[in-house]
Amino acid sequence: MTSDLWFALMGVALIALAAFTFFRQVHLLRRILAFNIMGSGVFLVMVGMAQHQRETDPVPQALVLTGIVVAVSATALALIIFRRFYSVSGQVELDEYQIEEPTQNEDHASDTMKDNINSLQDALQSDDEAPAKPSASKGDQ
Amino acid sequence: MNLAFDIVLGLALLLTALGVFSSKDLFRAVVMFIAFGLLLALVWVRLDAPDLALAEAAIGAGLTGVLMIDAVAHLSANTLQNDQRDDQYDHSPKRPLWLPVISCVGLFVLLLGAIRFRPEASVSLPDMVRDNIAESGVEHPITAVLLNFRSYDTLLEIAVLLVAVVVAMALKPAAEDRVHQPPPAHDPILHGLTARLLPAMLLVGMYVLWAGSYMPGGAFQGGAILAAALVFLQLAGFAVDRYAASLLRLGLALGFLVFLTVAVSVMIGGRPFLTYPEGFAGQLIFFIEAMLTLSIGLILFSLFSQNPPHSGAVGHQGANHDQ
């Protein structure tokens, strides 16, 4: 076994583990982290397999170099969108999972939800006031 | 011996990734992620790809790490007043486990099969690069691939970066909440150190750009160093944002515009799109690379500084309180 093949296999393991975490976690920041590691696994497979039992290959290396730069810009954009989402909704996960939240304090949860809907509507109406609203409503609770 | 080192390195990479996935504390996961990036840079060195090692250390570990730490600090600064909501987020919901397990094991097996039963390569790309490198205008094969043989990729890449930063600017909250933000804490040591380090950082960035034509280095690595220098400036409390309106916006699009202008203007001489005229390839590539370095540095920095502000030092204290 060459070290190129070994690192490609590590890349495969990273892809599978990152995919598992991506499905399993609901926190958006953790998903962004998992997505980044999945990308690194893909890069390892690309370079490792291209060089396995062959010489150093500049073409996949150049492709991966492009990939690293695009990955960081995508990550930065994802983080900006995440922060915007967080400042508007006050949540760190997407709404599809909110249904499964524990319901021991029903009225509290519905209040939060109402606040979120209000702040979302405010955000739609006037973009400028949006960042102030959710923090104000959070302070009240 | 070398293989033993590679095996240990690969296992360390896997373990750090597991640390990222399994740590309960978000800040800890991000620190593990930075360690993962540095180990990955070592892996690139072992895979005989020094260009990738440079880019991974500067971008994958450095810039992405700064961005993630900034986001975590933003998060913990805003959830400090209601901690009980915070730890409720870190638990996975009670959803069936078998679905992700099956899909991830299936993915693993399929990928192993793809590696085991891969088709034989019909052409040898390294040979093709070696045969044509004399005409490319540069001596370093990776720069030749990036800026000449597959320059479409690089042109589209800088376009993708430009789109990302434009979207980031569009998503930025209205500018007036920046005005009444208190000035960041002025650390005299960081301030003085940055002022003395900056010329050296710019020099290294220029050197890496210049070195790209005959050895590992080039526009991306140089741009990453430039971006790191700018992020440093911003963190040390220099008002880089003041120039944002005019200088930064001109620089953001410059790389893409220059590249596109060169690509189109060669068509006047009857050549296909993106084919450099003989004899001028070296100069044109260096000119494009210099502009790309400036643009990539400014774009990566803008993606960092476009983040909605979280009241300065409070965020970092918040991150410490969480521990």
Image (spheres, coloured by chain):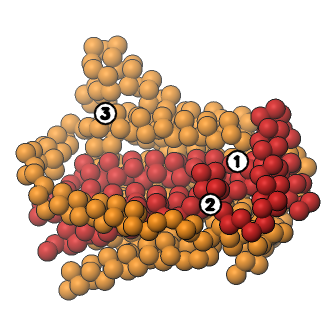
Q: Residues within 10 Å of mark 1 (few under 14, many from 20)?
A: some
Q: Which residue is mark 3?
A: B281
- Can residue A123 be seen here? The reply is yes
Check disc 1 and report its element: helix, strand or loop.
helix
Q: Chain of mark 2?
A: A
Secondary element type, mark 2:
helix
Place of residue B180 in the rendered image (x, y in percent of width and height, measured from the top left): 91, 49
Q: CA distance from mark 1 to mark 3?
A: 44 Å
Q: Position of residue A106 (x, y in %)?
A: 78, 61
> Residue B131 placed where, x, y %?
13, 43
Whole-percent x, y for residue A122 in the image: 83, 38
Which amino acid is tagged 3?
A: Ala
* Secondary element type, mark 3: helix
Pinpoint the chain carrying mark 1. A
Within 10 Å of the Cα at label 2, are there few (<14), some (14-19), or many (20+) other Cα atoms? few
**Residue A134: assigned label:** none
* Mark seen at residue A84: 1
